[in-house]
Image (spheres, rainbow, N blue to C red):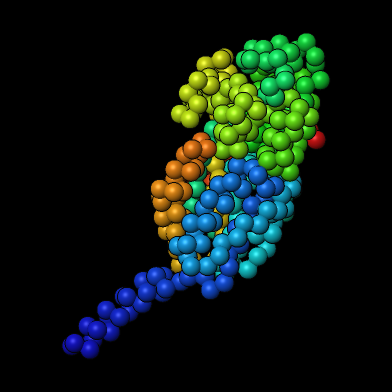
C-alpha cells in the first residue's frame, strides 16, 4: 500500500517538477521589431535586465525594425520553439497589421504562442517647439492654412500612431503629409530636430522630452488624461469623442513552444515587472503595468484584432507611404 501511494504521489508531482525545473541554458533573445530608442525598445531593455537576474542567463534585446514590425515578427515566427527566441511587439504589429495589410509574412494567432502583455501606454499628439501651435485648435488652424505642408511622422505605415493620424486628419478635416519611419525612436528624433513638425507617439518615448521642453504635447489620443502629465487634455475633451489609440507591448514565443516554457516566462515576466526597480522605472516614463495569463492574453489578442478591423473598415483607412 505504501509503495502504491508513493507511486501515485510521484506521478502527480512529476509534471510540476518538470515545469519548475525548466530554465534556459544559454542566452535568450528578445526580438524587438522596431528601431532602438523607441518605447518598445525602452520597455524591453528594462524587462531584459530583470529577466537576466531571474533566469540566470543573459537576456539580449535584438532590434529588427521595419515594415511596422513585420520583419522582426517573421524572424520569430520562423524560429525554433525552444524558449530561446521571443518577440516583444506592440498592438500595431499583432492587432493592426491584419486590418491594414492584405498579405503578411506571419499570422499573429497561428504563428505565435502568447505569453503576456507587459505594459500599456497612452498615445500623445505633440509638435516640435518651433511650430507656433500651443493647442490642438492652433495645430488644426495651421494645417488648414497650409494644406499638405505640415509633416507628420509615424513609427511606421499601418502602425498605431499612423492610424491615430488618419483618424485625426479625417475628423479634423485637414490635409498633412505622412512620413513613416522604422520605429518611434528615429521619428521622434526628427520631430525634435524639426525635419517633421508633429506626430502621435507612445508616452514612454516622449516623457523625458516633454519634461525638458524639447517637445510640446497638445493632447492625449484617448478618452482620459495621463496621470504622468495631468495638464495635457484628452482629445475626447476637445471634441474628438471617438479617439482611443492606447498602445500595448507584449511578449510572444513561436507557435509550438511547450506550455511549460510559456508558463515559466509568464511567471518570470510577472515577477520582473512587479519588482520595484522595474515597476517604478516604467511608471516614470508613463507605462502602466498590465499582465495576463497566456490563455487570457490569447483571447485578448483576438478581440484586439477584431476591434481594429472594425475601425479600419468603418473609416475606410488606406495606407499612404
Coordinates of residue 121 in the picture (x, y in percent): 53, 37
From the viewer's perspective, tell me whether residue 192 is left or right of residue 218.
right
Q: Residue at x 64, y 42 (%)?
A: 38
Coordinates of residue 109 in the picture (x, y in percent): 59, 53
Coordinates of residue 118 in the picture (x, y in percent): 50, 48
From the viewer's perspective, tell me whether residue 17 is left or right of residue 172.
left
In-front residue for pair 44/94: 44
Number of numbered discs on residues: 0
Q: Residue at x 50, y 20 (%)?
A: 231
Q: Is residue 316 above or below residue 280?
A: above
Q: Quadrant of the C terminus?
A: top right
Residue 97 appears in the picture as rendered: no
Q: Is residue 116 above or below residue 215?
A: below
In-front residue for pair 285/75: 285
Q: Residue at x 67, y 50 (%)?
A: 33
Q: Is residue 209 above or below residue 31?
A: above
Amino acid at each position: 500500500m505504501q509503495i502504491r501511494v508513493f507511486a501515485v504521489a510521484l506521478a502527480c508531482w512529476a509534471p510540476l517538477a518538470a515545469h519548475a525545473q525548466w530554465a534556459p541554458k544559454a542566452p535568450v533573445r528578445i526580438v524587438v521589431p522596431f528601431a532602438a530608442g523607441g518605447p518598445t525598445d525602452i520597455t524591453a531593455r528594462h524587462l531584459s535586465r530583470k529577466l537576466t537576474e531571474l533566469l540566470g542567463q543573459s537576456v539580449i534585446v535584438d532590434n529588427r525594425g521595419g515594415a511596422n514590425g513585420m520583419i522582426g515578427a517573421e524572424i520569430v515566427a520562423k524560429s525554433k520553439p525552444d524558449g530561446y527566441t521571443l518577440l516583444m511587439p506592440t498592438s500595431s504589429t499583432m492587432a493592426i497589421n491584419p486590418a491594414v495589410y492584405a498579405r503578411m509574412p506571419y499570422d499573429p494567432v497561428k504563428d505565435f504562442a502568447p505569453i503576456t502583455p507587459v505594459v500599456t501606454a497612452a498615445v500623445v499628439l505633440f509638435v516640435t517647439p518651433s511650430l507656433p501651435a500651443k493647442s490642438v485648435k492652433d495645430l488644426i488652424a495651421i494645417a488648414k492654412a497650409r494644406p499638405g505642408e505640415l509633416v507628420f511622422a509615424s513609427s511606421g505605415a499601418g502602425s498605431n500612431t499612423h492610424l491615430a493620424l488618419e483618424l485625426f486628419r479625417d475628423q479634423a478635416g485637414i490635409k498633412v503629409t505622412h512620413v513613416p519611419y522604422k520605429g518611434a525612436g528615429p521619428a521622434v528624433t526628427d520631430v525634435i530636430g524639426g525635419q517633421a513638425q508633429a506626430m502621435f507617439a507612445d508616452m514612454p518615448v516622449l516623457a523625458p522630452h516633454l519634461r525638458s521642453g524639447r517637445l510640446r504635447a497638445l493632447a492625449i489620443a484617448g478618452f482620459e488624461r495621463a496621470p504622468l502629465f495631468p495638464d495635457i487634455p484628452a482629445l475626447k475633451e476637445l471634441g474628438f469623442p471617438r479617439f482611443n489609440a492606447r498602445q500595448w507591448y507584449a511578449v510572444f514565443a513561436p507557435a509550438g513552444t511547450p506550455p511549460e516554457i510559456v508558463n515559466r516566462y509568464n511567471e518570470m515576466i510577472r515577477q520582473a515587472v512587479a519588482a520595484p526597480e522595474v515597476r517604478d522605472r516604467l511608471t516614470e516614463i508613463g507605462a502602466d503595468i498590465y499582465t495576463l495569463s497566456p490563455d487570457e492574453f490569447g483571447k485578448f489578442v483576438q478581440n484586439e484584432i477584431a476591434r481594429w478591423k472594425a475601425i479600419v473598415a468603418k473609416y475606410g483607412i488606406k495606407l499612404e507611404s
